[in-house]
Image (tube, rainbow, N blue to C red):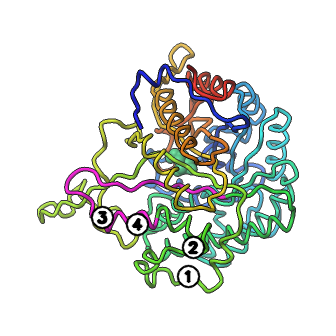
Amino acid sequence: MSQGHSSERTTTVRFPEGFLWGAATAAYQIEGGAEDGGRGRSVWDDFSHTEGKVAHGHTGDIACDHYHRLDEDLALMADLGLQSYRFSISWSRVLPGGFGEVNREGLDFYHRLVDGLLARGIVPNITLFHWDLPSALEEHGGFRSRDTVHWFADYAALIARELGDRAPMIATFNEPWCYAYLGHADGHHAPGLRDDKAAVTVAHHQLLAHGLAVDAMRAERNDLSLGIVINPSLARSEGEPPAPADALRRIDGIQNRWWFDALLTGQYPADVMEGFGALADAVLPGDLEQIARPLDWIGLNCYFDSLFSGLDPDPAQAGAPGNQPVLSFPTVRSVRPAPVRAEHTDMGWPITPDGFRELLVRLHHDYPDLPPVYVTENGCAYDDPVVDGVCDDQRRIAFLTRYLTALRAAMDDGVDVRGYYQWSLFDNFEWAFGYDQRFGLVHVDFDTLTRTPKASAHWYRGVVAANGLPG
Ligand code: GCO
């Protein structure tokens, strides 16, 4: 696709009537109130409080203090004209022990959130698991244990029972690849393990938990709209030496095909299973059938193409910084992250709108049963300051213009996309990067907790109102 800047400025890009525009957040990244209202600890509390795990020792203890500023934040969402708000529920806030006794006060927070959204005409879109597993369950082996699969289904049923009447749109998991592999293979995320077999087990158990939760929620109510959120990404070679083709194929299998094949065809890809061998011992007969339950929609979180180089074969370079193998794809030890591209966000992530379009079109072609798609996350980190009350983040507007143009082109190519959620509503706790990486439409001053809508927030309000990009 051509991405000429001049044509972007003059082209008007319209979306189909009924297209849903929203913004997304996640519980641990914004709520704070870590000790309040009977909330139990999660693996992210434990991880962020472990020295050396998160930049500057930042934690989500306070974050955006959304737990205490719900009314102010709801008013902000209404001001921005959001049509939908995607948020996650903190499992340990509603079930401090992971199962068993319900913490009514925690659950009431989500009742107030849902009611507050509806009162403002904003469609709630709930995610049940955005990585903050209750610590009590981690003590039982977390998602490495098959027991957690059943506890998740019980938790899902509880939420469907409590909130499903007013918030029928529910996703089970957010980016299970990240929780499995960043959490258990390369240790960059909670719970911080480096154990390939644990990672593959967690990848499988999350999908199994998803399938059981779908059944458990449908048993509670038959009018829910259920989905799951995956983060697919095209794996490409860049730089020298090139990444081996076989490694890229394995990465594609682990990051992409594993999830879509299981969910939509009821099988794991044969090449990935063969590569995993005994690492995938957790996969038992009957599991895939349970996983491949019909879905009402699928969420895709899309940011960038994954770019890899081969390792420098010079023995003198072995172990040198910058020549370390990527650890987040078990069985693949022959690639390293490609050098940061000229065109990147402040996070160092490459800007790849063409890949975004190509990825959507590929999924549409490869999976005839792909359900309607929501882009549940897309966005960029830019560190623009507030000067005289204004945060002029023109780079975000430029980034979003290019990605939304690519999204519309993918829809013209036949991909059935029903909505788009900007990541994120607020600057927030960006996991192991702490508060350094600012993804928000709304700037948050983490000393005063003052919220300042950025230029992009005003721009996005216009996009939502016009159902498209300004001409
Ligand atoms: C993810 C998560 C978000 C992140 C965002 C930016 O995609 O990793 O869903 O919680 O904050 O993606 O990294």
Whichever of callouts 1 and 2 sits on the residue coming sooner in the sequence is 2
Contact, CB < 8 Å: mark 1 with mark 3? Answer: no
User: Would residue 248 be visible to someone looking at this image?
Assistant: yes
Circle 2 residue: 204
- State the SS at label 2: helix
Q: CA distance from mark 2 to mark 3?
A: 25 Å
Contact, CB < 8 Å: mark 4 with mark 1? Answer: no
Examine the rendered structure and indicate whether residue 417 appears above or below residue 292.
above
> Could you tell me the amino acid type at mark 1?
Ala
**What range is drawn magenta here?**
228-254
In this picture, residue 468 sits left or right of residue 67: left
Circle 1 residue: 282
Circle 4 residue: 329
Q: CA distance from mark 2 to mark 4?
A: 14 Å
Circle 3 residue: 245
- State the SS at label 4: loop
Classify the position of the C terminus by image quarter.
top right
In the rendered image, the residue lying farthest to the top is 388
In this picture, residue 467 sits left or right of residue 185: right
Binning the other alpha carbons within 10 Å of mark 4 as few (below 14), some (14 to 19) or many (20 upward) gives many
Q: CA distance from mark 1 to mark 2?
A: 7 Å
Q: CA distance from mark 1 to mark 3?
A: 28 Å
Q: Position of residue 370 (x, y in %)?
A: 62, 59
- State the SS at label 1: loop
Of labels 4 and 3, the one closer to you: 3
Which residue: 12% across, 62% down? 314
